Image (cartoon, coloured by chain):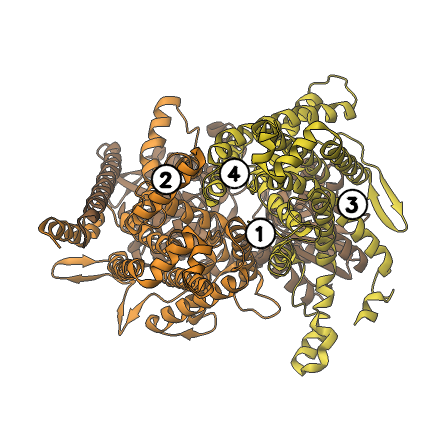
Amino acid sequence: MPLTRVPFRLRSVAVLSAVLLVAACGKQEEAAKPAAGGGATVVKIGHAAPLTGGIAHLGKDNEAGVRLAVDEANAKGLTIGGAKVQFEMLSEDDEGKPDKGPIIAQKFTDAKVAGVVGHLNSGVTIPASAVYNTAGIPMISGSATNPKLTEQGFAVTFRTVGRDDQQGPAIASYLAAQFQPKVVAVVDDATSYGEGLANEVEKSLKAAGITVLAREKGTDKTTDWKAILTKLKGKKPDAIFYGGMDSGGGPLVKQGRELGIKAVFAFGDGACTDKMQELAGAAAEGLVCSQAGIPAQASSKSFIDAFKAKFGSDPIIYAPFTYDATNLIITAMQKADSVDPAKYLPVLKAISFDGASGHIEFDEKGDRKDAEMTIFTLKDGKIVPVAIIKSGKTIPFEEFAKGAGA
Amino acid sequence: MDAKAKVGIVLIAVVLAVLPFVLAHVGTAWVRITNLAILFCLLSLGLNIVVGFAGLLDLGYIAFYAVGAYCYALLASPHFGLHLPFWIILPIGAGVACLFGVLLGAPTLKLRGDYLAIVTLGFGEIVRVFLNNLSRPVNITNGPQGVTLIDPFKLDGFSFSKSETLLGLTFSGPIKYYYLLLLVLLVVIVINVRLQDSRVGRAWVAIREDETAAQAMGINTRNVKLLAFAMGASFGGIAGGMFAAMQGFISPESFVLVESIMVLAMVVLGGMGNIWGVIAGAVLLSFVPEILRYTVEPLQKAAFGRLIIEPEVIRMLLFGLALVLMMLFRPAGLFPSKTRRREFAAAEQQHVG
Amino acid sequence: MLFSLLHPANGKPFMEVFLQQIINGLTLGSIYAIVALGYTMVYGIVQLINFAHGEVVMIGAMVALTVISSLAGANTGMPPLVIVLAGIACAVPVCMGVGYTMERVAYRPLRGAPRLAPLITAIGISIILQHLAMLIWSRNPLSFPQIIPNPVFEIAGANVSGVQIAIISLSALMMLGLTALVYRTRLGTAMRATSENPQVAGLMGVNINRVIASTFVIGAGLGAVAGVMVGTYYGIAHYTMGALLGLKAFSAAVLGGIGNLAGAMLGGILLGLVEALGAGYIGEFTDLCHVSWISTGLAERCAQDGHVVLMGSNYQDVFAFLVLIAVLVFRPSGLLGERVGDRA
């Protein structure tokens, strides 16, 4: 080989050494953290969510839930297995990218965390869960709703949030009971979340004997729904369900009303926000939507108060679920009197716990038994709860709130 | 080969062999990051054949990665209940990706330069949209839900996903994948080096420099260009298959346009047409976000008390700036190939004169 | 199968839905046409695909959004129409500035370089503009203030909104204005001369640099107006909104014949119609239940669901690219242009 190529190789050696150097720096930082415990055993709990990027605000919300639970536990000064323990949250940014999931999971494994709360997106949680499973670290997601997550047969995978196939039937049964539609159109944004939820809604509607039109799809960036809506208008549906986020749902309902469509518009939790009013104006009035779990105002008052006192704002969506997930891990550790994942995992599986998002028990897959769903409607520019769906039964919200207060 | 070169090679070999254990000592996560970087090296080398050697700007290269990944996922997962061994699927994936490369290349051969770029971009998007939507009426790709529980590489009970101890050393899953990836990378590098100096390689360069002249010299430009597309695509397909096996789960959101542009940025930064430059570019840009995570974040937090510009944004801005500044000041890349440098210098002179 | 489409029992009468889709397509097409003009002007004069043009449109929308929401929120007592005009009046010069800077910094130094070089810088510029916009206006989708009352008129059973009428007529006006500029003014003559042969035009006393810069500036100005239109029409703005819009508009320009003003307009409107009609009807045309006799399994599914659609509106975003590829392969000159495929 000619001599001229040598410098390139030397350069690549230089690059490699630079990489090693950087890696070493990273190590030092990680190693510095556990010293903060001060005598007590430090138990690390991992939290992963996109902390940068398009849904960073949701990631921060999740993180806040974990932080609150960890700080509360530390304030109590718990003793587990005869030693004082100090909990520490390791929060990592998975950027909401599927290929970053396993890397973050590996980082937690390397750092020997005792349990993980996360991740936020189903698409990231699923590849990450395989790494946790190999390492035997229990993982509880407070927001990944894709049914597949817990269908992989992993013993360490749990979630405190309802699955798409629990939320879908809920909003579908409410639609069917409340509006008695004959024909329903189902639209989604061709994302894992939107399509997954729309599939479940379609299944439930069909089971209720309702005609469902051929699926229409946009993308998560679609803002022009007019062609699809015009087609639907010709088919005269009584209700239109959209699986997707508010950035697509807002324009959808706005353009639908502009075209003179009188059907009821229904949405899942991604478009169950006050932003719908901002994006669609008066057209948003009267839409119905569902959220997994029970609404913050009906969940434990103490959680909301503590959250507000600590962070100065209300939780956005999933903070109660990550708060509960963290407390579940801590409670299981207390009950098993061990912070060893192998020891507290069986306890976690069999746990019965009352948290900020209601009563929690896990089924054999790691999903929440009888997860509650809440139906909201948009009234006077605000999302307000109207009903709670539990085990297929619809309970009007006032009634439920009274029951919870008692 | 002289003594200096020999020493260099031995040095590199030792560093590469020991690397995963050093990294694993720091944290196995770094091995995973390195593995991803090697995958990007494979991708960049594949794209380099099309863009660097033959001078055909391909903005939809990630489509071949996607095709390879989906081939592997569909043939080795419970989705169709198929569990073929990897040494059968990887070549199939490469073959199918190659076919897609020819499919894309054949009708667009007449187009030159920027038109080709836009058409390939469109092609990349079309492939992704189809992968995202081929879940109905018949479920082929499982749509946006992606394919789960993809088999890891297995050889007679030797699974790449399990941890094993040999001679007192722990070979974790990522470390095994590291050696496998390194092996594949070496093979691909050898093929690339051989290609570069081969008849075909020279023909590609000739086409890149002046297509009309190349044709006049008796080069069958159609076949030679098609070959570039096909070769580039099949490397992408192999990389995709390995990605699917390592990841265990794939969905169309991993194969968006930004990824194509990222690979292009790696090729451009390192120097189009230069194998070692391209590898350097890929390694550099793969590690940038991790490096930023440990430098920029704490720096900003110390200076402003909070994160003002996220590392991911800085990375994207760096990509953009790299593309612009490289073209303005070092159009032949950080480590340009000799001919490429000559070509750009010639263009410069023409302009001045 | 056509019969079932036309049959009134199939929901709303066919003609009303069809007319509505035409109106949808025309509105969308007008926006594409205005953006496509920006691509085609630049291409016509320097044979460069200004990849970052979509980002200029996005910046136009964002600047207008900021101006309009702050004016509307400040209780100035200005009538809504004046506020929107003020938004446009701010967006246009900002975009023109961006267009000029782009040309000066990223394209002019590369005028003699190999073809790929300016295209790669264009991609780089596009990434940079997107992420700068993200830093300024956040990653979240922003709601575009809807302050102008938007009355809806019914014409022959189809609904047309005030904003749609405004978009279509404003686009027509701008196209007329641009045509007048190119064919009736000194600058226009200089532009045409430069696009014909820059060296000779230079020798004839045309300041080529100025002409090229003006082309970028005018294109960017049109883009800014298009951005405001998109924002007002859909009521939402996002930092990534320009990318796909730009690609589609570029496809429109190629469809009409790139470098050709009339071609860009025609291409834009055609693409808008193709998308609206495609999304509206492809599902019906590829519904396998029309041919359910070919297999009993299919017939069973049809009886159960009423439809087995092969391709639905989910392929809407693909139409533009398919059109683009088809045009480039079969008629690289586009509908109205001269043959440029080889030159490119």
**Sequence-first disc among 1 and 3:** 3
Q: Are marks 2 and 1 on the same chain?
A: no
Question: Are dots 4 and 2 in contact, CB under 8 Å?
Answer: no
Q: Nearer the viewer, residue A40 or C114?
A: C114
Q: Chain of mark 4?
A: C
Residue C334, compared with residue C196, is above or below; it is below
| Chain letter tied to orange | B
Measure how far apart labels 1 and 4 are at the Cα level.
46 Å
Is residue A403 in view? Answer: no
Image depth: mark 4 or mark 3 in front: 4
Measure how far apart labels 2 and 3 are at the Cα level.
61 Å
What residue would you read off at disc 1?
A: A372
**Amino acid type at image mark 3:** Arg
Q: Which mark is residue C248?
A: none
In the orientation shown, which residue stands out farthest toward the right? C156
Residue at 39% x, 63% y is B231
Q: Are marks 1 and 4 on the same chain?
A: no
**Circle 2 Cα neighbour tier, 10 Å, few/some/many (<14 / 14–19 / ≥20):** some
Q: Chain of mark 1?
A: A
**Amino acid type at image mark 4:** Ser
Q: Position of residue B251 (x, y in %)?
A: 48, 58
Q: Are marks 2 and 3 on the same chain?
A: no
Image depth: mark 1 or mark 3 in front: 3
What residue would you read off at disc 3?
A: A257
User: In this structure image, what is the colour of chain A?
Assistant: brown
Q: Which mark is residue C126?
A: 4
User: In this structure image, what is the colour of chain C?
Assistant: yellow
Q: Which mark is residue B345?
A: 2
Image depth: mark 2 or mark 3 in front: 2
**Circle 1 Cα neighbour tier, 10 Å, few/some/many (<14 / 14–19 / ≥20):** many
Q: Are marks 4 and 3 on the same chain?
A: no
